[in-house]
Image: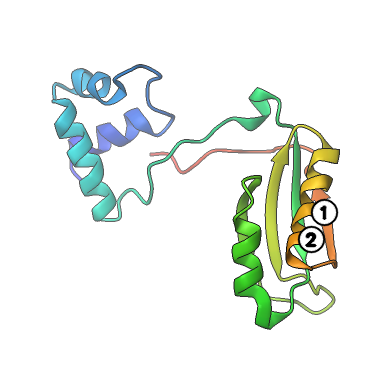
Amino acid sequence: MDETEEKIIKLTQNGIPLTPSPFRDIASSLGLTEEDVVTRIEAMQDKGIIRRFGASIGHRDIGIIANAMCIWNVPDGQVEDVGSTMASFEEVTHCYERPRCPGWEYNLFTMVHSYTREDCEEVAARISQATGIMDYRLLFSEREFKKTGIRL
């Protein structure tokens, strides 16, 4: 990684400017063109320096305060199909298969965010109905300790 790439990372790691032309603004501060900045970001992704470049919404800041990890006991032979169905729900932001552990029969995990606990419960009930998986629990977040990525 060269010095310019490091500067680009430092300028973007806490979020890009909320302006109509954020990459042009970054480029201007570095004496580059907007195309140079975008090309360098893409090259850093290709080299694996940047794993992904995406948006993150501060869901608590906009009132989405009910967060439920839905844990599901899915028969092993059905995980692919059931997981695809669960992931297709727009309310599901994450869907993961995890190994079962002794005393822990749950192997599929979905994360649901909403405005109320009741909304999360309703989403889980709809997912259960759509998949036929009745053995599930909801684990609600009580508080958020940290939400940041790696920083230079």
Name the residue at 68% across, 56% down. 110
**Neighbour tally class for label 1: few under 14, some 14-19, many 20 plus, Cα within 10 Å:** some
Label 1 amino acid? Ala
Res. 41 image quadrant: top left
60 lies above or below 150? above
Label for residue 45? Answer: none
Q: Is residue 125 visible?
A: yes
Residue 46, image x, y percentages: 24, 54
For the residue labelled by badge 2, is the local secondary structure a helix, a strand or a loop? Answer: helix
**Residue labelled with disc 1:** 125
Residue 52, image x, y percentages: 38, 48
Tell which of 105 and 133 is nearer to you: 133
Label 2 amino acid? Ser
Residue 77, image x, y percentages: 66, 83
C-alpha span from label 1 to label 2 = 5 Å
Asked whether disc 1 touches disc 2, contact meaning CB atoms under 8 Å apart, the reply is yes
Res. 143 image quadrant: top right
User: Which residue ends up furthest to the bottom in the rendered image?
Assistant: 77
Name the residue at 24% across, 55% down. 47
Name the residue at 78% across, 43% down. 141
User: Which residue ends up furthest to the front in the rendered image?
Assistant: 130
For the residue labelled by badge 1, is the local secondary structure a helix, a strand or a loop? Answer: helix
**Neighbour tally class for label 2: few under 14, some 14-19, many 20 plus, Cα within 10 Å:** some
Q: Is residue 97 visible?
A: no
Label for residue 128? Answer: 2
Residue 31, image x, y percentages: 14, 21
Tell which of 11 and 45 is nearer to you: 45
Name the residue at 73% across, 76% down. 100
